[in-house]
Amino acid sequence: MSQKTASSNKIEDTLSKKYIPKKEFWIFTIAALGQNLAYSCMSSYVTDYYINVLRLAPMFVLLLMLFARVWDAVNDPLMGMIVDRHESKRFGRMRPYPVATAIPIAVLTILMFTKPNLVDMPLMIYTAVVYVLWGMIYTSSDVPFWSLPNVMTPNPDERGRIISLGRTFGGISTGIVTALPMIVGPILKNKGYSDVGADEMKYKIMAISCAVLGMVLFCTVSFSAKERIKLPNAKSNKGTGEKSNLYRVFHCKPLMLVVLSGTLSFGRYMLQAAAPHVARYAGFHMKDDFQANVTAVALTIQICVAIGMFGAMVVVPFLYKKFNYKKLMIYTCIAGFVMSLLTCLIGWTTKNLYFCIPTMIIASIPLGVINVVSYAMVCDSLDYMEWETGHRNTALGSACQSFVNKLGNALSTVMIIGMYMVVNIDVNSMYDASGAAAINLTGGQEFAMFSLVTIVPGVSLLLCAVPLFFYDLVDEKKDKITLELAQQREAKGIIVE
């Protein structure tokens, strides 16, 4: 056997080898569940809490979200560069961050849903400080955590599976957060809380539960994960004549296509975040009592979303054998667009949300596919970057995904708030002196709110598919890059433990 053939066989054996033990595999996925408990609580309910509990002006909330995302445009890549350039000899490059950020995230999540004894400008300042700090600390945990699979295994299939299972468990946490109002709301109502008082206490209980349990589970990954690929620290390259780290990221075509696709898919976040708003103002009646009706309508929408999303996340690993990432994304996004429009047509003509359940479930399937596949595509794009340039900016590349997620969440929030302003819904006129709801909207206003979970997400999913037609890191090309990258690492003496 020739030396070249022996080396090739050795590399192929390395790529087929499984590196992550079952215990470590499962702890990572449980940590993903914990992390997403806090995130889902924030992303699903913060706009409803700010507008309908704290009664903050919609324009202020809109500007807050936009400012926070502008800051994230600096904060996310900065965090990525910090992680890429520094490594602890004892704890590695990624593992220190989850345990270091767990307590601050828990505290800030609770503060975010705790109504202070403040009004007007002091309340706005409090809200802005807590929200921006939460985003900064969350970035400090999110970027290194989702960079971990890149250094846990050199096997792209194994990496795809751990990302898939991690995102699936994140979907489970979304389901938990969705179910909490169904448990907490009726208990508070039975204890005599008014509509406003029940909302306030409900969110506080949910925030404490998600923050404490979530961060306890999240920080366990710091003590169990192993960083097996020992890549050299990234350097600034300033004055060396080499391309900068940011240049390599922004000129990595497959990565930028994934980023653009993810940005255009912002409407998927609205299926969860807009549900409480639709429940309040879209005119669907499932219960006689206001609070019970809000809970029932929101829960129906969110359960449909959770079933479609979680179901997709469970089956995605099995679909990898038949469809590549590109096909999965394009096919499901187009199907989601069609089903979203059908949901709008059925719901608005019948005014019966039960008839919408099948189409809402199918329309939510792309959420699960995007949640899983986009992360795997980012990792593949980083393989391409390393193969093409000899450098791998793991955390900086992953920071792009973190930024896209938060930008998408903010854009969905802006869309929700913008709808309040466009159709002139004044929250302060919706409740009487006792705190009970007294809502009377026009048909146009109700349709506009319903479009937040139908037309807008559907169009967003269709747009999401467009950049992916130009993504070519699939099949033979992907296999070729994977094999040649392993050869490059072996030649450079990069250690894989």
Image (tube, rainbow, N blue to C red):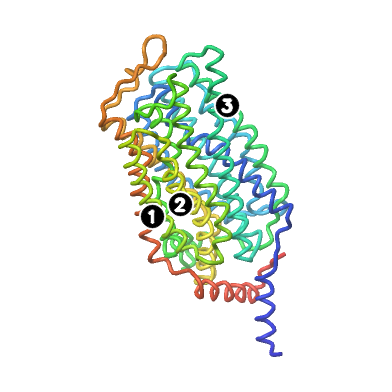
Q: Secondary structure at mark 2?
A: helix
Q: Along the horizontal axis of the image, is 486 left or right of 362?
A: right
Q: Amino acid at mark 3?
A: Ile
User: Against 87, is 347 above or below?
Assistant: above
Of labels 2 and 1, the one closer to you: 2
Asked if residue 407 can be seen in this view, the reply is no
Residue 330 to residue 185: above or below? below
Q: Do we see residue 216 in this rendering? A: yes
Q: In terms of sequence position, does the residue under pointer 1 or pointer 3 come before the other?
A: 3
**Which corner quadrant of the image does residue 84 belong to?**
bottom right
Image location of residue 196, percent across then percent down:
45, 17
Q: Residue at x 39, y 17 (%)?
A: 437
Cα gap from disc 1 to disc 3, whole angstroms: 35 Å
Q: Could you tell me residue 363's position as x and y percent?
A: 42, 48
Q: What's the residue at 62%, 37% (across, down)?
A: 214
Sequence-first disc among 2 and 1:
2
The residue under label 1 is: 464
> Does label 2 or label 3 sit earlier along the sequence?
3
Q: Is residue 108 left or right of residue 363?
A: right
Instruction: Identify the image quadrant of residue 376.
Output: bottom right
Q: Residue at the location (36% across, 12% down)? A: 432
In the image, 295 versus 31, the foreground residue is 295
Q: Amino acid at mark 2?
A: Pro
In the displayed structure image, the side of residue 160 where residue 305 appears, left or right: left
Which part of the image, by quadrant, shows the C terminus?
Answer: bottom right
Query: Circle 3 is placed at which residue position?
Result: 183
- Whether the residues at callouts 2 and 1 have beta carbons within 8 Å, the answer is yes
Kindly identify which residue carries mark 2.
Answer: 366
Q: Secondary structure at mark 1?
A: helix
1 vs 3, front mark: 3
Q: Position of residue 97 (x, y in %)?
A: 63, 45
